[in-house]
Amino acid sequence: MITGKNCIGGTWKADGNIEFRTINPKLNIENPTVFLEATSQEIEEAAGSAWKAFKVFRKMSGAKRAKFLNAIADEILALDQELVETYMLESGLPEGRAVGERGRTVFQLRSFANLVENEDWRENTFDAAEPDRQPIPKADLRKTMIPLGPVAVFGASNFPLAYSTAGGDTASALAAGCPVIVKSHPMHAGTSELVAQAIVRAAEKTGMPVGVFSNINGGIQAGVDLVSHPKVKAVGFTGSIGGGRALFDLASKREEPIPVFAEMGSINPVIISSDAIAKRGSDLAKTYAGSITLGTGQFCTNPGLLLTVKGNATEDFIQELAKETIAIDPQCMLHPNIKKGYETKGENVISQSGVAVVGRFDGKLDSNYAPSIIATVSGSDFLKNPKMHQEVFGPFSLVVQCTNDTELIQIIDGLEGQLTGTLIAEQNDSLDLVEIVEALQNRVGRIIYNGVPTGVEVCPAMQHGGPYPASTDSRFTAVGTHSIKRWVRPVSYQSFPTGLLPEHLRS
């Protein structure tokens, strides 16, 4: 049962007086449960409890943490239809999406459990002593990774499960030995509470220390209080550039600055060669219409920018893309505010000089349903106007028609950092594919060849991050088992007696 309370180190509390409700975006009405925002004192208690838990949790064996993660997965599955139905009521997303995202969440938890069952993930390094080395003896040195401390995780609006309460940030931080304090996203506070209840039950069943997990409700002030707290040692965030940058700046101004790993906006450029358009333009139009409208375009990897070289076949492709895109039935967006943001940002782009709307769904729309839009502009106009470079979060894509390959490369070089870049080409393409790839790899975290950017596999080789503003630190990924590296730091032990070394460094 959803209570509307805050989970403070395993205890459910509601000491505040600021209330809010979530929205059913399909019906455009408030859901009945009243949620209470966490007070500053409750956040203080959560941070203090997490710090106490850290002193115990960081020393627990990987096998015990793995048992905890697997128990969380089991408890989430045990929520069954209650979780699915709450997810749908708060997001407007269909049941299939809810079930699929739950499966992804469970898979992530079990993946990190498998990772930490042994200590290989710590990248332990051993350099044996050489006491007879001349002119200076060499000391015994052993290096390992240790957890940073309590982590604040901000739930994402567009993934109520996989990037939220028990999502990748939480799973990887717990796996590393860091207690977690989640600030649930106000759009799906009920979904977050159900998952928080599952985590608390798992913690109790597996003997985790009190304070290993907390879940708080609240808005901007709760986030400020959490990131500012001296016992919080790192932050995980998935969301807008404005939100991520605000947290990054706040954390940097602390007396003890802490890392903020924020995965933010991206327009995910797709380069489509003239040869590919000539050979399979119709198929590409259908494929990309599906990718642009997938999940109402509410993915951080949505292909919001297509780059081509101008020509007759290109013009036909753009018309076909628009036709295929607007033929797909509009879908509900996550929240009225997100629908409003889509309309505002979309209109801002298409109102720029030189931009032409090729296709726009103009049928009847229910509240919070999004009309898909395909627009086009010349390469020269795009280069001159940075306002066209902004992310439009929804089923929108801008096709840029370049004069030649040189202009296309110039556009890639001038883009902000992106999560992904895609190259659609033929085996013996006339486009200089090596030059394109070299340009893309300086701008993106993941390059896709002859595919679509939507869909992020959870595996060790995945890189979900990129140069700013795609993320605040392009050296790390927010998806896959390597994301655990965000929550640890290296420590070297020099000339230590065996008995004082961590157990995994003794042999």
Image: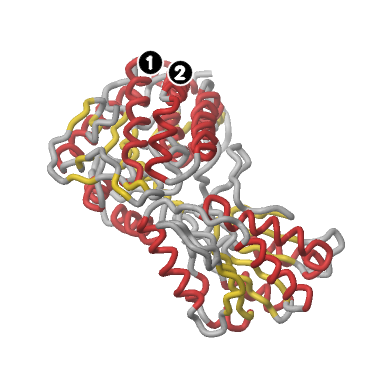
Q: Are marks 2 and 1 in contact (CB under 8 Å)?
A: yes
The percent coordinates of residue 208 (x first, y second) are: 34, 19
For badge 1, the amino acid type reads: Thr
**Quarter occupied by residue 472:** bottom left
Quadrant position of the C terminus in the picture = top right
Alpha-carbon span between mark 2 and mark 1: 7 Å
Rendered image: mark on residue 461: none
Q: Is residue 129 visible?
A: no
Q: Residue at x 27, y 48 (%)?
A: 223
- Which residue corresponds to mark 2? 67
Q: Residue at x 41, y 45 (%)?
A: 91
The percent coordinates of residue 327 (x first, y second) are: 63, 60
The answer to whether 469 appears left or right of 428 in the picture is: left
Point out the tag, 2 or 1, that comes first from the N-terminus: 2
- Which residue corresponds to mark 1? 206
Query: Does 474 sit above or below residue 373?
Result: above
Tag 2's secondary structure?
helix
